[in-house]
Image: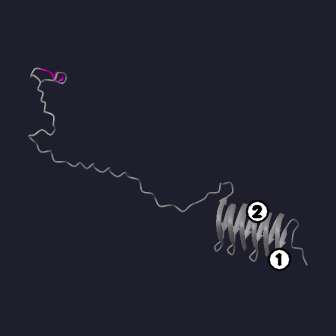
Amino acid sequence: MADTNTPGSLLVGEGVFMKGSMRVPGLASIDGKLEGELTADTVHIQTNGSMNGRTTASHVRVAGAVTDTTIANKTLVIESSGLIAGSITYTDLEIKKGGSLQGSINKVGQQPQNFAPPSPPVPPVVAAPAPEPVVQASPAPEPTSAPTSASPEIKAEAPANAPASDMARKPRN
């Protein structure tokens, strides 16, 4: 049997399930199922392969399924049969027709942004005019000839040449 695995590489064949934390200096080719944490220079998830966990590599190519966290420090290629979901960070991104990308997507070197759906514009607030004060006119009292109090009515008249202030100081009898 020929050795197809080069030194420093990992090959997870179809039907193989691996769980754990792996550091691979070269290529990690996954055609089986891998769960956990994978750090490599290059990661290829083959058509039958799946990775669930944190995947970190310079180059990531997905033809199978990758879920959870993916960090592609240089290139991320999603083949037409590929599905990638979760928190995705990349430098260069290529999605082939039919490939699927779901989750939060951030470019390397940029701060993650939370996007909310746009909200409808808020109309400007216009102050309503203040209501006009309501003034009710009361009918004027009817003049009466009889005094309304028990004290006698005192009338003061100022002389024609006297200022009005003198009248206030000097009462007349």
Look at label 1 and name its amino acid: Val
Which numbered tag is attached to residue 79?
A: none
Element class at badge 1: loop
Look at label 2 and name its amino acid: Thr
Which of the 4 quarters of the picture holds residue 171? top left
In the image, the segment drawn in magenta is: 162-166
Q: Residue at x 68, y 54 (%)?
A: 109
Element class at badge 2: strand
Which of the 4 quarters of the picture holds residue 106? bottom right
Give the image location of residue 102, x and y in percent. Answer: 64, 68
User: Quick check: 161 above or below 25?
Assistant: above
User: Quick check: 133 above or below 18?
Assistant: above
Q: Is residue 123 magenta?
A: no
Give the labeled residue for mark 2: 56
Mark 1, Cα crowd under 10 Å, few <14 / some 14-19 / many 20+, is few
Q: Nearer the viewer, residue 8 or 135?
A: 135
Quadrant of the rendering where the N terminus is positioned: bottom right
103 on left or right of 30 = left
Q: Earlier in the sequence, mark 2 or mark 1?
A: 1
